[in-house]
Image (cartoon, rainbow, N blue to C red):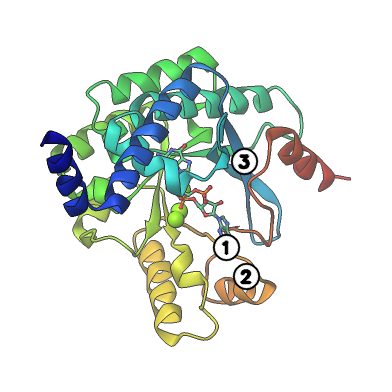
Amino acid sequence: SAKKDGRNTMRFFDPGMASDVSHRLALEEEIRTSLGTSGFSMHYQPQVDVQGRITGAEALLRWNSPKRGAIGPSVFIPIAEASGLIVPLGRWALHTACAQLACWKSQPGLRDLTVSVNVSIRQFRERSFVQDVVDTVSDTGVSPSKLKLELTETVLIDDVDDTIEKMRQLKELGVNFSLDDFGTGYSSLSYLKRLPINQLKIDRSFVRDILTNPNDASIARSIVALSQALGLGIIAEGVETEEQRNFLAEIGCSFYQGYLFGRPMEAASFERSVRAQDD
Ligand code: C2E
Ligand code: MG
Ligand code: MG
Ligand code: MG
């Protein structure tokens, strides 16, 4: 009977996979719904110079799912990317971060801050990406030179012509680029020279064991040397201890981001941290 067949079918169907797919679909639906409501917010994590002064922030998406509570980007970003929802979500993130930057522009003590915004490859490949950034900059009134877009190495190797064209147009507008998670991808060194990149961001995976793993220390050293040879800025992510910071400073890395200096936080807390250093 049909009922019996159904039961047989079920036996050969991996229940773990079924729940995985339906879980993803459920999350995708919730992301879609949250986009129209206020389920998403941006947090800001300090970026500091060699003196420990906050020079800017990385804007990081946070999601408070109405059903499940706080869910991290490592869970929802891949789902948003696979479903294409990263395009409207990324647009919202860019707009929100720029609106925040515009707000800081009018406040003494905050007006020199920069903001780094992550851009996923899917968002970058949109035909309207450059225009979206141009519109966001003009709608919010930010100084483009205070805006940094964080791209990953994947963007560099896949469709180089499109990448060069878009980066050149945005560079002309005055926008800056940071190469995120640097060292984990496959970028050819020749692209680094051809593209208008301003900064390399040493991936957290090399910083974590920098004091104990000679390979990680060598990679970090090489990235710093590369940035210097190409005249690029450098920042290390995932700096959690004073010892890591000191080691990085010794090898010539003079900007840092990590829990040692502050976790990603709401804009109001971030502003308090910036103001506190002038007291
Ligand atoms: P990412 O761009 O490399 O961001 C840095 C991540 O490292 C953040 O995780 C941050 O909270 C975390 N982090 C910073 N300092 C430390 C530290 O000292 N120790 C440790 N253990 N972690 C640290 P988060 O916020 O969970 O974001 C994860 C990833 O999600 C980001 O990695 C980025 O790839 C993506 N993401 C976040 N927001 C956006 C967004 O608005 N758009 C896009 N496309 N991707 C985003
Ligand atoms: Mg980033
Ligand atoms: Mg990163
Ligand atoms: Mg990372």
**Residue for badge 1:** 254
Q: How far is the residue under mark 1 from the one under mark 3?
A: 20 Å
Q: Nearer the viewer, mark 1 or mark 3?
A: 3
- In the rendered image, is residue 242 in sight? yes
**Residue for badge 3:** 44
| Residue placed furthest toward the front | 1
Residue at the spot x=27%, y=20% of the render? 128
Of residues 52 and 265, the one nearer the viewer is 265
Q: What amino acid type should be assigned to the residue bearing mark 3?
A: Tyr
Residue at the spot x=60%, y=28% of the render? 101
Quarter in which the C terminus is drawn: top right
Question: Is 204 located above or below residue 276 in the figure?
Answer: below
- In the rendered image, is residue 196 in sight? no
The residue carrying mark 1 has its beta carbon less than 8 Å from ligand 1:
no
Q: How far is the residue under mark 3 from the one under mark 2?
A: 20 Å
Question: Is 187 located above or below residue 99 in the figure?
Answer: below
Specify few, some or many for label 3: CA neighbours under 10 Å numbering under 14, 14-19, or 20 or more. Answer: many
Quarter in which the N terminus is drawn: top left
Q: Nearer the viewer, mark 2 or mark 1?
A: 2
Q: Are marks 2 and 1 in contact (CB under 8 Å)?
A: no
Q: Nearer the viewer, mark 3 or mark 2?
A: 3
Q: What amino acid type should be assigned to the residue bearing mark 2?
A: Arg
**Residue for badge 2:** 245
Question: Quarter of the image holding residue 109?
Answer: top right
Of residues 173 and 66, the one nearer the viewer is 66
Which circle's residue, 3 or 2, is located before the other in the chain? 3
Q: What amino acid type should be assigned to the residue bearing mark 1?
A: Ser
Picture coordinates of residue 174, whole percent (x, y) = 42, 31
Left or right, residue 169 beside residue 203: left
Picture coordinates of residue 210, whole percent (x, y) = 51, 78
Question: Is 164 located above or below residue 129 in the figure?
Answer: below
